[in-house]
Image (cartoon, rainbow, N blue to C red):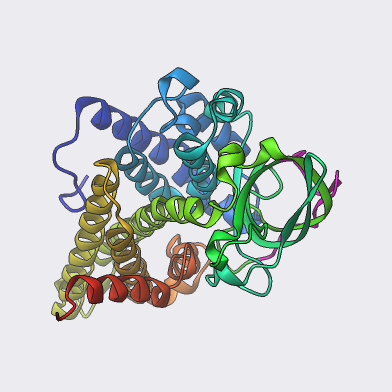
Amino acid sequence: MGRIAQTDGLTDVQADILSAVRIFVDKEILPYATELEHKDEFPEAIVEAMKEMGLFGITIPEEYGGLGESLLTYALVVEEIARGWMSVSGVINTHFIVAYLIIQHGTPEQKQRLLPKMATGEVRGAFSMSEPGCGSDVSAISTRATPDGDDYLVNGQKMWLTNGARAGLVATLVKTDEGADSVYRNMTTFLLEKEPGFGTHGGITIPGKIDKLGYKGVETTEMVLDNHRVPASSILGGTDGRGKGFYQMMDGVEVGRVNVAARACGIMIRAFELAIAYAQQRRTFGKQIIDHQAIAFKLAEMATKVEAGHLMMVNAARKKDSGQRNDVEAGMAKYLASEYCYEVTTDSFRIHGGYGYSKEYEIERLFREAPFMLIGEGTSEVQKRIISRALLRDYKLS
């Protein structure tokens, strides 16, 4: 291990967990990631090992069978996993957000029934806000849940569901027309339980996998809802959760943005490791290319960006763990880490020269994974909007 991207003040338990995950990544993910990624093959063996390690329940309280760890612990675990292969971190990302939503906003019955199965990975979670006609503009969603006796009928189309096929539980934001004066109070989150797999089951259709530039191995899907009948008890938080869906989802997005920042950090850590190793192996004009000042300075810039992204991600996670709102800190961390990830990975690609363009070299995979960090959980422009609005509130002239 190098000196960058280290975290001060960890407990012995946190240090032990991270050590175990780091060993797992080096032995069980890195040697197989590129081959699996090129085949777009789901990492079944890796996921089964993650179940055995308890990673699906890392933040779920011990009373429900989880490890009861903090957001910081989870983010640092994600950083390590993304260093090995970002797609693997995607397998647990939306699952973690759904578990977080149930822990924070679920009814006692929802917690007792769902969290133990989620802790073992028996039930996997997916998270659904986006639709084909809108991304970050959540107010524009058109999927609706209409009351029908004691139940609701849900109709609409959702987009960009990570784990959409393998998930058995999808936290889904819909319009419910609660009669509020704000569109944001006319939304409700439903916990839709479904059969894993592609095809149509009970009014839910998962058509197939969306082919992507990167982020392969883990499936990304659409979800079509056609008169899907659900009981009112499926509302996150029960009847008290009606009309609170937007605020619940934004709470989940805050931790999701810390997660994306952690994934970006993992990718750029690996890109830096590959670059500094290659720069000591490749020789030009009679010396290692790291001895050329242009390359040495580039590596210094890359390491500084890795360190900055890591520190901001850790700060955002710790603030959320303290019980404070971290929308600005999470937005800043996600914005900075994702932009720096793209820059560091591009610089590593350039240092590799022509070999960086070859699929035989790992940097080719990282170069395709990095752009997703720029758009996942909201684009950089969305983060800037969140940050600037908060700054204007805090620094408003009287």
Horizontally, is 365 left or right of 117 in the view? left
Where is residue 373 drawn, in percent x and y?
44, 65
Let me know if residue 199 is in the magenta part: yes
Could you tell me which quadrant the N terminus lies in?
top left
Q: What segment is highlighted magenta in the picture?
A: 193-211
Q: Please tell me which residue lies in front, 103 or 311.
A: 103
Horizontally, is 286 left or right of 191 in the view? left
Quarter location, residue 214:
bottom right
Where is residue 217 drawn, in percent x and y?
61, 52
Let me know if residue 26 is in the magenta part: no
Where is residue 12 drawn, in percent x and y?
20, 26
Examine the rendering and report whether any part of residue 218 can be seen. Answer: no
Above or below residue 201? Residue 55 is: above
Where is residue 26 drawn, in percent x and y?
39, 40
**What's the residue at 36%, 58% (across, down)?**
261
**What's the residue at 42%, 73% (across, down)?**
382
